[in-house]
């Protein structure tokens, strides 16, 4: 449902014919006017654009002189790789730490974590990115940005994967470190709430071992807010990844969007925002599905 | 509202920061646009407490920098040419709040040499002066955006919480939407569609406005929560029975409950919006030259050669951390009080 | 032009000598016995090896008729030959496919004789038909080749006809100074490969990137071997190339040239440092400094080939045809005053720009002609030292004064402020604009720097005339003043400060028009120089453009690359690719 609202919102605002003027000659403008029916009222325009977008034609980029859709897609793959991987890693790291830090034993995890999260919370992602780049440039432990090193174009696929992995270190590290504090906090809060419930207290008195208690019993109860968090964190991750891609020269949607803005490349901007909206909508849809799957209360409510 | 000692300390620190930024002209030895073209990319000045012969003075001094001919960006100190740092010197004129004019500076050195506490940038402009003055724009942007955001959020949240029903549902749906939006994408897209004829400064402030409109969601939800709970309080019911209008009730009874949340949110939001401004300026979508902001001082670091060689240009970025730290810690301090009261 | 007699003489002597030699001595390469090769007097190198260079963008086509972008032209230049070629180092013309040329007394007819026995890279013989075909194609309006404009003299296209089995006459509508320079880079096309496409009207689509190598042939030192999209384009040695060295070995020495596609300048430098490429074409000043430090440790050297032809300049909107807004017209009241422009020029810190923007690797300019054209530059143009006092005096004389706060105000009391438009993607020009902003602050002028995307800048300057001042750079393709006609003629397309009206707006512009037209048809070089000097003096005095700096040509090459002579004219590194050789056994890159 949210996804649908999203799709409605994203392209509609931006389709304004006046914005097209600075870029193209009068003849081209007139031609585009006719082609896209820009002389018709806004709703008609919007729907015809939707129609053409749905059929795969997303317009032509002025800067690259190429159709927008394949351009976006080739960049989007890279962004998806980066964002997806970061999301995965972030959750994989945050979940266990968050769960343990909410428990009563191993208090040092909790104290250590809160210190770490506070530090990471106040450090802007930009600074993390610049810092890592600085380290990379000074020590050459990992590549300073970019996606492929140049030798790898000739190497075999195993070497290419290794090369890609090396290049992923820096941007993924920044994204993960940037996203950790918020995640950790929410997980910890959700777990703490879940641990207070009578259900857990009953389970504890039954003598269920500690870690099983945490993971098998408390965590699923805490999962509802966490799954919604998944949807929201995707949005902020996407934002941060835009910045990181530009700073670290990762050929994703970020640099494309920035260039397109500076070049007033209207269709590319619309296409990129549209794509990110779709991606986000997709993520939230997955979140909705997960919520449905994991929370028996929703299911039973529907049935019963 | 009672504050813990730590909170009081933090508030003082932040107030000090604001004062520093307001009086940046006084504290900064040089004008922000002054280019010392022979001293581009100069490292931070070394403060000497001993003179050439090795005797220790209490009075710090700075030695003249000379560039190595032929080598760009490499400097050597000329230890024969040292000048003491003077206090309360007359220098370039500046204005405080555009009203008070003065040319008194806290410290400076004789014109034959320069004191660069944080080094210089690619044009030879003093980074320390630019950092102090840059804070004006960055903090002002953060503050404005926060106020706008809170105003809109408070309004919508109160309406949603108080009236409930379809208004509540639609506002909350909208809030969810805005919460999930990738704000930077949205901002970029908005920037792309601003007319070309708008000056960079105009575009910047318009962007601040847009930014704040994107961020109303979180405070709105929190406000709504408070309003919902306080709506059911006895005195509110009593007031309604006595014939108080909605506006009266909202103004007199509900809103005061929200003040603490608003304050906490404000303290949390200011650094977020400052960071947003920094990001925008860093990417080149901020104010025009030569006005400094914390963001565009970092933007030359996008070039790897600059990042690797001229480490002092990272300092403005590093200094952001304690500033944000202050805000976040203060927000933390303000919160448990509220939790204790709500529970 | 003054060396006109020499090429003929040298060529004829060498040709007869080589003809004798070749007819008597058998050479390793097979060639017809009456092939007239050009003997090149470069230091002799040894054959073999592969050179790897980089291109920042992929070429769009291999078609010499339609190509416009830089990358395509770079590759095509290696594959094609012209009748008369401009030696990029000496900047003079030398005979290429033509073995002699004469000009009629009235300057309207150029007679060129072709060398005998030359062959295209696919072995097919070259004859007059090919030359006629080539010019027919270039001049055909339906083909719409960008080269056509270059061949229009006196408003009419050149005409060609054959007079002999090996001679052609080119007819000009009016005398044109240094017309032989027109032949440079007009590639001679193989009729046997392109005729059909021409007849079918599909010439513009011919020789795209996917074309197989057998279908592409030219007279250049190399021919197409392989193109891999997104990665590289490889050329191989043309076994039929018509030049040989003194030791009678047929040039080129190199077996292959590979152009790697590298997306940006940083990546290019990284590849060069890693040893993937052997030569770097245009370096930025920072990269140059960074590489300079490394050059002794690794086996390469950086070279500063001296000033380029590029000149960066500031100019004001002096258009009489303006958009409806009156803001700019008011400001033009200031811009139109010569003393105002002179004052601005006096206030600028050109040395600072050379130091900060180009790290010292540039030359300050007071005339748009750079010292790369050593013959044409007018050394008598004054180079005034920067002086704020002098600038203030000039402004006072122009009726300006200063307010209490130090701002410059005009005679009606309004403060002088304007904006400078520049391309956001060009960081050097943006930096220069920021420095100008600070300089003008010292005379009380408040300047706003407006970096916009390049196409918006172009649109504002050329179409809507919606700007106050702008900072641009133009690069002459050739040293000859004729290549700058479009800029200095009032009717020219690049007369950037005043477009739209075709007649001169001021007396001095009228004088420039007269002088430029006159030098166009003045054949004697010294007389031309006097005319062009006068043009430079008028420009320096009236400042329609305020020249700023000209960046140097900075290149790098591996030490093992022999005969490497970087030139100030484009292409700086590979202009003499036929002479380049790799010493030592291993060439770079993978086999």
Image (spheres, coloured by chain):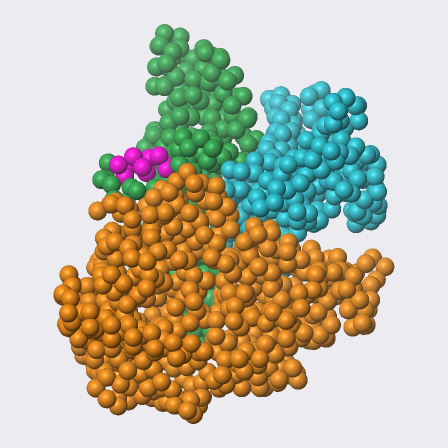
- Image hue for chain A: green
The reply to whether residue C506 is in sight is yes
Q: Say which of C232 and C18 sits in front.
A: C18
Residue pictured at 20% horizontal, 69% vertical = C21
Residue at x 36%, y 75% (from the top left corner): C7
Q: Is residue B137 magenta?
A: no
**How far across and how far down the image is residue B89, in percent?**
83, 39
Check if residue A164 falls in the magenta segment.
Answer: yes
Q: Magenta region: which residues?
A: A159-168
Q: Is residue B135 visible?
A: no
**Majority secondary structure in the magenta region:** helix
Residue B41, by quadrant, is top right
Residue, x 79% and y 23% (percent of image)?
B57
Q: Is residue B112 left or right of residue A260?
A: right
The picture's colour for chain C is orange
Residue under the image location 29 percent in, 77 percent down: C12
How many numbered marks, from 0 up?
Answer: 0
In percent of width and height, residue B126 lies at 68, 42
B25 relative to C170, above or below: above
**Front residue (pair A33, C437):** C437
Picture colour for chain B: cyan
Up/down of C252 relative to C590, above or below? below
Q: Specify whether C296 is left or right of C52.
A: right
Q: Depth check: C361 or B309 in front?
A: C361
The N terminus of chain C: image quadrant: bottom left
- Residue C228 is left or right of residue A3, and the answer is left
Residue B240 placement: quadrant: top right
Question: Where is residue C81, by image quadrant?
Answer: bottom left
Q: Nearer the viewer, residue C107 or C314?
A: C107
């Amino acid at each position: 449902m949210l996804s649908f609202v999203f799709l409605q919102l994203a392209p509609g605002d931006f389709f304004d014919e006046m914005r097209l003027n600075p870029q193209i000659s009068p003849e081209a403008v007139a031609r585009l006017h006719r082609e896209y029916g820009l002389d018709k009222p806004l709703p008609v325009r919007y729907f015809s654009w939707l129609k053409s977008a749905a059929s795969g034609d997303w317009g032509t980029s002025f800067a690259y002189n190429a159709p927008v859709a394949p351009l976006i897609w080739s960049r989007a793959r890279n962004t998806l790789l980066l964002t997806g991987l970061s999301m995965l890693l972030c959750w994989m790291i945050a979940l266990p730490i968050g769960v343990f830090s909410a428990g009563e034993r191993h208090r040092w995890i909790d104290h250590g974590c809160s210190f770490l999260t506070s530090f990471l919370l106040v450090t802007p992602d930009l600074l993390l990115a610049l810092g890592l780049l600085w380290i990379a440039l000074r020590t050459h432990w990992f590549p300073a940005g970019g996606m492929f090193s140049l030798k790898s174009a000739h190497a075999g696929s195993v070497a290419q994967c290794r090369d890609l992995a090396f290049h992923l270190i820096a941007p993924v590290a920044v994204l993960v470190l940037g996203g950790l504090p918020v995640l950790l906090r929410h997980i910890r809060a959700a777990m703490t709430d879940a641990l207070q419930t009578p259900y857990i207290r009953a389970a504890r008195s039954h003598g269920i071992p500690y870690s099983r208690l945490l993971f098998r019993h408390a965590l699923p109860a805490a999962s509802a807010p966490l799954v919604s968090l998944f949807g929201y964190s995707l949005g902020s991750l996407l934002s941060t990844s835009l910045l990181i891609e530009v700073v670290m020269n990762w050929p994703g949607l970020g640099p494309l969007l920035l260039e397109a803005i500076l070049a007033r490349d209207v269709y590319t901007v619309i296409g990129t925002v549209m794509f990110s909206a779709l991606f986000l909508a997709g993520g939230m849809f997955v979140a909705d599905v997960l919520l449905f799957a994991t929370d028996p209360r929703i299911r039973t409510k529907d049935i019963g | 509202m009672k504050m813990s000692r730590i909170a009081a300390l933090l508030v003082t620190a932040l107030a000090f920061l604001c004062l520093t930024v307001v009086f940046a002209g006084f504290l900064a030895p040089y004008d922000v646009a002054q280019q010392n073209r022979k001293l581009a990319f100069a490292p931070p000045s070394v403060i000497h407490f001993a003179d050439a012969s090795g005797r220790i003075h209490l009075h710090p001094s700075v030695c003249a920098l000379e560039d190595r001919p032929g080598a760009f960006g490499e400097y050597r100190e000329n230890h024969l040419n040292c000048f003491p740092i003077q206090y309360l010197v007359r220098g370039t004129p500046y204005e405080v709040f555009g009203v008070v004019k003065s040319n008194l500076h806290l410290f400076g050195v004789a014109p034959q040499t320069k004191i660069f506490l944080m080094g210089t940038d690619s044009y030879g402009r003093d980074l320390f002066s630019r950092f102090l003055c840059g804070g004006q724009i960055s903090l002002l942007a953060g503050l404005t955006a926060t106020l706008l955001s809170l105003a809109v959020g408070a309004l919508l949240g109160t309406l949603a919480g108080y009236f409930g029903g379809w208004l509540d549902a639609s506002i909350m749906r909208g809030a969810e939407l805005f919460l999930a939006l990738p704000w930077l994408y949205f901002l970029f897209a908005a920037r792309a569609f601003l007319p070309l004829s708008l000056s960079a400064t105009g575009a910047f402030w318009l962007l601040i406005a847009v930014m704040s409109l994107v961020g109303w969601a979180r405070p709105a939800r929190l406000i709504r929560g408070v309003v919902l709970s306080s709506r059911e309080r006895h005195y509110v019911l009593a007031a309604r029975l006595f014939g108080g209008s909605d506006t009266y009730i909202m103004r007199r009874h509900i809103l005061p409950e929200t003040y603490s949340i608003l304050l906490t949110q404000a303290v949390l939001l200011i650094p977020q919006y400052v960071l947003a401004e920094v990001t925008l300026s860093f990417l080149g979508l901020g104010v025009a030259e030569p006005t400094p902001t914390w963001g565009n001082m970092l933007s030359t670091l996008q070039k790897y050669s600059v990042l690797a060689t001229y480490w002092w240009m990272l300092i403005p970025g590093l200094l952001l951390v304690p500033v944000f730290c202050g805000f976040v810690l203060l927000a933390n301090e303000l919160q448990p009080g509220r939790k204790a009261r709500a529970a | 032009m003054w060396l006109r007699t020499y090429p003929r003489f040298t060529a004829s002597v060498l040709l007869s000598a080589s003809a004798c030699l070749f007819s008597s001595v058998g050479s390793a390469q097979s060639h017809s016995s009456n092939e007239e090769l050009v003997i090149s007097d470069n230091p002799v190198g040894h054959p073999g090896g592969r050179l790897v260079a980089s291109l920042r963008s992929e070429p769009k086509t291999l078609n010499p008729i339609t190509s416009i972008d830089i990358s395509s032209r770079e590759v095509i230049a290696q594959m094609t030959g012209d009748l008369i070629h401009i030696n990029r180092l000496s900047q003079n013309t030398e005979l290429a496919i033509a073995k002699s040329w004469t000009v009629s007394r009235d300057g309207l007819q150029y007679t060129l004789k072709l060398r005998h026995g030359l062959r295209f890279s696919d072995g097919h013989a070259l004859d007059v038909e090919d030359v006629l075909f080539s010019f027919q194609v270039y001049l055909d309006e339906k083909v719409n080749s960008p080269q056509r404009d270059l061949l229009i003299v006196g408003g009419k296209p050149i005409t060609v006809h054959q007079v002999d089995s090996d001679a052609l006459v080119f007819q000009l509508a009016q005398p044109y100074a240094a017309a032989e320079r027109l032949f440079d880079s007009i590639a001679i096309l193989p009729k046997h490969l392109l005729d059909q496409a021409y007849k079918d009207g599909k010439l513009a689509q011919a020789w795209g990137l996917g074309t197989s190598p057998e279908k592409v042939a030219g007279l250049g030192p190399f021919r197409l071997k392989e193109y891999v999209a997104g990665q590289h384009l490889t050329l191989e040695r043309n076994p039929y190339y018509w030049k040989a060295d003194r030791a009678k070995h047929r040039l080129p020495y190199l077996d292959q040239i590979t152009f790697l596609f590298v997306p940006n300048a940083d990546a290019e430098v990284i590849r060069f440092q890693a040893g993937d490429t052997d030569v770097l074409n245009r370096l930025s000043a920072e990269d140059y400094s960074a590489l300079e430090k490394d050059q002794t440790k690794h086996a390469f050297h950086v070279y500063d080939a001296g000033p380029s032809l590029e000149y960066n300049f500031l100019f004001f909107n002096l258009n009489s045809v303006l958009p409806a807004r009156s803001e700019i017209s008011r400001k033009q009241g200031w811009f139109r005053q010569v003393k105002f422009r002179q004052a601005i020029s006096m206030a600028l810190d050109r040395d600072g720009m050379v130091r900060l923007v180009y790290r010292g690797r540039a030359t300050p300019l007071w005339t748009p002609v750079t010292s790369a054209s050593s013959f044409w530059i007018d050394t008598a143009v004054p180079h005034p030292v920067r002086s704020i006092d002098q600038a203030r005096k000039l402004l006072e004389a122009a009726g300006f004064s200063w307010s209490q706060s130090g701002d410059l105000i005009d005679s009606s009391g309004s403060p002088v402020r304007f904006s400078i438009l520049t391309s956001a993607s060009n960081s050097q020009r943006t930096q220069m604009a920021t420095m100008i902003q600070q300089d003008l602050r010292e005379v009380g002028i408040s300047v706003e720097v407006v970096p916009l995307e390049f196409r918006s800048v172009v649109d504002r300057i050329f179409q809507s005339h919606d700007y106050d001042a702008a900072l641009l750079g133009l690069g002459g393709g050739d040293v000859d003043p004729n290549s700058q006609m479009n800029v200095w003629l009032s009717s020219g397309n690049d007369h950037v400060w005043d477009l739209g009206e075709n007649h001169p707006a001021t007396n001095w512009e009228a004088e420039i028009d007269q002088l430029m037209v006159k030098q166009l048809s003045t054949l004697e070089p010294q007389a031309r120089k006097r005319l062009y000097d006068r043009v430079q003096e008028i420009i320096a005095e009236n400042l329609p453009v305020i020249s700023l700096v000209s960046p140097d040509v900075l290149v790098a090459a591996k030490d093992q690359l022999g005969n490497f002579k970087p030139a100030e004219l484009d292409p700086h590194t590979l202009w003499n690719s036929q002479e380049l050789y790799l010493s030592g056994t291993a060439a770079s890159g993978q086999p």
